Image: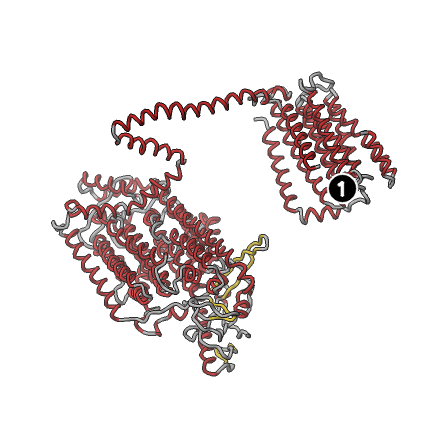
Amino acid sequence: MIAADALPTGFFLDYAWLIPLVPAIGFALIIGFGKKLPYRGSEIGIASMAISTVLAVGAVVQWMQRVNTADSGSGSAGGDGGALESVNGFARSVFPSATAGENGEPYVEPVIRTWTWWQNGGLEFGLGQHIDGLAVLMLSLVAFISLLVQIFSLDYVRGDRRYTHFFAALTLFSAGMLVMVLAENMVQIILGWEIMGLCSFMLIGHWWEDTANSKAALKAFFTVRVGDIGLLVGTAIIFFGANQWAIDNLDSHGFSVQAISAWALSGDAGTQVLLWGSVALFIACIGKSGQFPLHTWLPDAMAGPTPVSSLLHSSTMVVAGVFLVARLYPVFWEGLAFGPGGLNLIAIIGAITLVIAALLAFVQDDIKKVLAYSTVSQLGMMMLALGTGAWLPAVFHVFTHAFFKCCLFLCAGSVSHSGSHHSFDMKKDMGGLVKKMPWTAGAWIVATLALTGVFPFAGFFSKDEIIVNVGENGYTTLMWIAYLGAFLTAAYMTRATYLTFFGEPRGAAAGEHHDDVDAHTEEPHDEALVAAGHHLDAQGEPEPGVGHVAAARADDGHDGHGHDDHAHGPHESGKLILVPVVILAFLATVSGFTNAVPFGEDFEILKRYVEPRAAVVDLEDARLAIAGGPGEALQLIAPSAAAVDACGFAAPPDGAVCFFPAVNHAPFKWSKGFLALGIVGAGLLSAWLFCVAFYGRRDRRLVGLTDRFAPARWGYLFLWNKYYLDHLYERVIVRGVAYPIANAAYWVNQHVIDRMVDDSGRGTRQVGEFMYRNIDQRVVDGAVNASGTVASETGHVLQPVQSGKVNQYGALLFGAAAVAGIVLVLINV
Amino acid sequence: MLAANFLLLSAVIFCIGVFGVIARRNAVLVLMSIELILAAVMLNLVAFSAVLGTIDGQVFTLFVIGVAAAEVGVGLAMVLMVYRNRRSIALDELSEMKG
Amino acid sequence: MTVTVAAVLAADGINIAKNVGFGIIAFGMVFAALCVVSTRNIVHAALWLVVVLGGVAAQYILAGAEFVAVSQVLVYIGAVMVLFLFGIMLTRAKIGSDEGMFNDGWALGIPVAALLFGLLGWVIIDYAGDDVIANQTPTPTVMLSDAYLGPFLIPFLALTFVLLAAAIGAIVIARKD
């Protein structure tokens, strides 16, 4: 079978590897020269992200051209039966009997280029690019969001003492995500993954002088590390499973993403290998993407500056886990058996995360923590979608979620920057800000509506698609859980919106200024806030001017924030903050139309350009395409005629491979759409009424309910303590590891056994004492003492040998060697 | 020539070196005796290289020469330090490690 | 043992001259080595050591290892001996003879050495009693360099680090501070 001529590629596709390289170089430049530059390095960061964005957008355009060409070529093949045709100047001969993959769509070969990074023992580790629809989508998303966040940071962290380092870390962080997104092989994925882990540590702990911040940074780092072990183990398992197959069939190796995908779907892969490999890889995703039960680091990561939270939670770090599952979807598809349906690990974890994180968001007073739990919940939704075979809706949700979650975080940052005097406490320092900060409030509300999934906004399309697909693929229970999640999302976001922007202004939002030393820190933790609050109460209403002077004085020790703009209480933020926020709010509104299923095929842009085609590809073609080095010819791969069953449901025939399973796409149903809208509406409305009653009117029936009604109190405490997971980790697991097992045994001995003895009757106690006196003291101690004595006596006997004289040691050494040699010789003779 | 010539010669020198290590009291002299042992070993290596007709023995001899140079440097530095601290390099006086 | 050596010498008729040269050098080496471990003058011991090491270099040439022989002369007689003499000087051992050069238990060395020699001699005669070194043409140095820059490259690099570490270690240890 002869492959067809080249699909159109182009500069931006061939040189997509520049996209992460530019910020990486930018990082080096910022570290090296940033402090000497007029804007202290921020201009390099923004410039590099802008270049990356331009390159990524170019790649998107060229990828779309490539897909278009492939599609038109395929259409002609169907119509003309293999006639030569020229479209856009690219002549192609398509395999005559080319028939459908799944939907009559040809396989669009990703643009793969590799360079050898290092070799070891016959293994080659490459760096390269694997550019397909998913990659270009994520590349443009990450680069664009990073650019906006950096612009936002210009104003937000102005005057910070580690301003240059902040931009350096931010740039490297984006570079790490970009490296991972276009990774051609697993080693490169690990590389990007770990760069992100390191940078998140640096950024979360940016204000490390505060113990809480450095603790949060450590917690994030270590929790993710727990998952990273899964990544290493999973990569190793997959490598050992796939390597030989990849060499034999594709002239590739067991790290190549493309080869792994083909191997997983080939039917030659061992079930156990796939199962454990995918489980190990998913553990990595649990850690990185904050899935239950390793989600606890994410809310604590709010200790970092707001732009960091925004970047972390929208398009980078936490999405990395979702991306990994999406990228290696065939492995998970086969390993966890998505094809036949039925519950699997990813779907279950995703569903659990979706609900528990949404519940936790209700008891948070910190606006950023609400958003953090919201992120965790939405990530759970994405995982749920991936785990139920809804690949495209999950990726679509990643795409839309990035815009509105980034927007929400930036709004929160804007509020704290200009409205609440660097506090994030909704109950103490916010409220009524809609009048003072109309732009921020408007953007927030738009993003909230998008997140909750109200009709024309982005979240409606992506979330509804997930829910519909989950239901369509046979997971009715999980579908209702997703509806529940949507309801909860609407409710907690309404609460946050009400507390922040409506009702009576409180604390800093009312123009009060903390004159406590701690209060000026950007991210005050709870204790400082409480202290500050009490302080204020004691003083009543301090004069703004006095408070300002005190705050400015205290600021000298911190980061020298210019406080001229804080003199008059809450106000709207500056343009540098508002512009990214407004852009994101706009995108949160319209990005849903990129895959608006309700409006028909023409609106399903992501489906056409992003989802890999589930086509059975002839092995020869696949081999040509994978093995190519830099600048190889790019092939239009004709789908093999031999396709009997769709990929992912049956092994491809001999001599052919699949690269992506034929995922199901649910048709849109208005009934389900309206149901979702109704549920969201109910959530919004009920939460609004509750908020007005509870926070606004202080309704007596609701206030203090947790004190009067025990189950409510228990539930509240359970949530307030985050399901006690942190207690479990810190008090049980960490200590169990940190202290030697002997200590644990000692503790059990002392407490458990002693208590048992105490609780038993007097006779038992006497027996215990008898045991203690006779057995313990005499037998056990006697044995211990006796062994000690024996050891001591032996030591005394042997003591003269240890003369401390080197010569004697030498004599003994050589003499013993000689004797041993003689013995050996005698034995062997 | 017989290989045993070289091997026996190296065995003799090796044993003389061993005697020196055991008998000598002065640390510098012990180091010299160790040099004798190393020389014997190297001679052995070269002899085997000649017997087997391969280059590897000579390669290793050069490695041993390099390592021995390092050993002498560090060893003499230690002897100097001991001398500076205790005004003596008699090994039987350095017996604080005795049990 | 003398009988054995004589028999060995007699049994090999290929190159009498080499054998005679070997015997003379070997005798000198053994004598010098005995002096190294028995003289009461520490400087003399060092000088006798020069003789032994020079003899070893000569034996290398007999065995066809010229480059190794030259390295031996350079490193040992050139550098290591200077180090030893400096060590002797800096530790202010008497230049003349000195009582107390031996341990109390020095006699222990004799049986140990004899035992070792018995073992080694036996093994050598048993293992290589009649192996003949057929060809003693000098090894081309290019072969050695090929080996170093080829299969032994990593150990070679490692050795450079050993030497670097030794140099730094020696400075750190011997520095006065």
Residue A367 higher or lower than B31, as above or below: below
Residue at image point 74% right, 48% down? C143
Q: Residue C105: give x, y in percent of width and height.
A: 67, 19
Q: Residue B35: give x, y in percent of width and height.
A: 70, 31
Coloring scheme of the render? secondary structure
Q: Residue furthest left?
A: A700
Image quarter for residue A740?
Answer: top left
Q: Residues within 10 Å of mark 1 (few under 14, many from 20)?
A: many
Residue type of the residue flagged with mark 1: Phe
Residue at image point 60% right, 35% down? C168
Q: Residue B5: give x, y in percent of width and height.
A: 80, 36
Residue A769 higher or lower than A728, as above or below: above
Between A224 and A167, the residue placed more toward the observer is A224
Between A593 and A627, the residue placed more toward the observer is A627
Q: Residue A277: give x, y in percent of width and height.
A: 45, 55
Between B71 and A248, the residue placed more toward the observer is A248
Residue A376 higher or lower than A595, as above or below: above
Residue A447 visible in the displayed image: no
Between C125 and A355, the residue placed more toward the observer is C125
Image quarter for residue A138?
Answer: bottom left
Residue with the mark numbered 1: C67
